[in-house]
Amino acid sequence: MKKTNLDKLLERYIQGQVTDQEKMKIEAWLDVKKTEEGTNLVLDDAGEEKLFRKITANIDNAEEIRSFRPRDAAERAFFRKTWFRAAASLLLLIASSYTIWHLVAKEESPQVFVAAAGIEKVILRDGTIVWLHKGSRFTFAATPDGERTATLRGEGLFEVAKDPSRPFIISCGEASVKVVGTSFNLKSDDAGIELKVLTGRVRVSTPSNTAGIVVIPNEEAVYRKDLGLRKSVMERDEAQTVTARTDYNMAFKNTAIKTVIGRIESKFDVDIVLENPNVNDCRITADFTDHSLESTLLMIRELLDIDYTIEKSTVTIQGSGCN
């Protein structure tokens, strides 16, 4: 069957080749597809083309996309398409992963981390990854109602696990940083904070600006007690600077699976076992940046003929790969 424009867009979404605005709109529609009503929503060819135009339009219309419905009974089940099913699976995985974390978090004490030397990586209970700079102190806890709260003194690169229903709030002295599923670099000291956003949206609030400001990708915000809160466009190559010496960048172009596996093992502190060594001969082009371990594996499963199981810190991959 010939791929529609929407099929191709969703394929680019899986490979990390859409704009931040397109990604936000696609995930807004996927949020609808997770609901009981949404799983029954189907689109005919005209409906798919209309949704494609809405997603790629250069306007902020996410709410309009969430309310988009086909006018007529559709002739084919859009939700069953391969790329759409893969994308929706990622969001369902996020929801189920949070449920498990939420039940465990209520029983555990706050986590406290201090980076003694160089840049040290920590993986939190909810799957969030933080690369802390030397001398930084970071705490993480879950409130009884499941809210994710943290404090930071120093500097860290954050890749926050996505969960729209449970914001991640970091207190930095007078300033507060509130995110959902976002990646950013944050520096906090006595004078204030410096924030550089890589993906997603971050809201920064202060005592004099309780409503706060929203900071989007490639923007930075600076708060100083004597100067207040302001934001600006990040300098060129700043993203590369703040992600240097970390495993944050997970974009691959025609890369051997053997290399990809090594990077996944390093980032998520897991061991990956291939039941079929021939999988090492496969090559892929994909962007797994800002994705959890399981969503990364799901995306690889859609690109190759493989499946996987996870047991504690060991991932076993089965299948023929690209043969």
Image: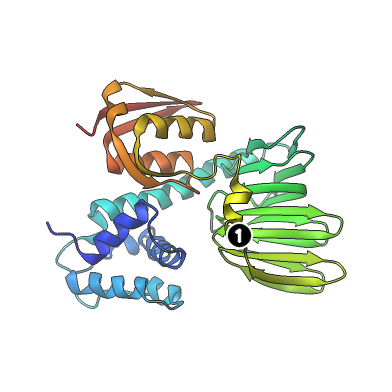
Q: Residue at x 18, y 59 (%)?
A: 3
What is the secondary structure assignment of the residue under circle 1?
strand
Q: In which quadrant will I find the N terminus?
A: bottom left
**Residue situated in front as seen by the camera: 248 or 304:** 248
Q: Position of residue 313 (x, y in %)?
A: 50, 26
Q: Is residue 48 shown left or right of residue 99? A: left
Q: Residue at x 36, y 51 (%)?
A: 15
**Residue situated in front as seen by the camera: 270 or 18:** 18
- Number of numbered tags placed on the structure image: 1
Quarter of the image holding residue 166? bottom right
The amino acid type of the residue labelled 1 equals Val
Q: Residue furthest front?
A: 236
Quarter of the image holding residue 309? top left
Q: Is residue 57 shown left or right of residue 122? A: left
| Residue assigned mark 1 | 197
Vertical placement of 66 versus 195: above or below? below
Characterize the local packing of mark 1: few (<14), some (14-19) or many (20 or more) Cα atoms within 10 angstroms: many
Q: Position of residue 275 (x, y in %)?
A: 31, 21
Q: How is the image coloured?
A: rainbow
Q: Residue furthest left?
A: 1
Vertical placement of 105 versus 266: above or below? below
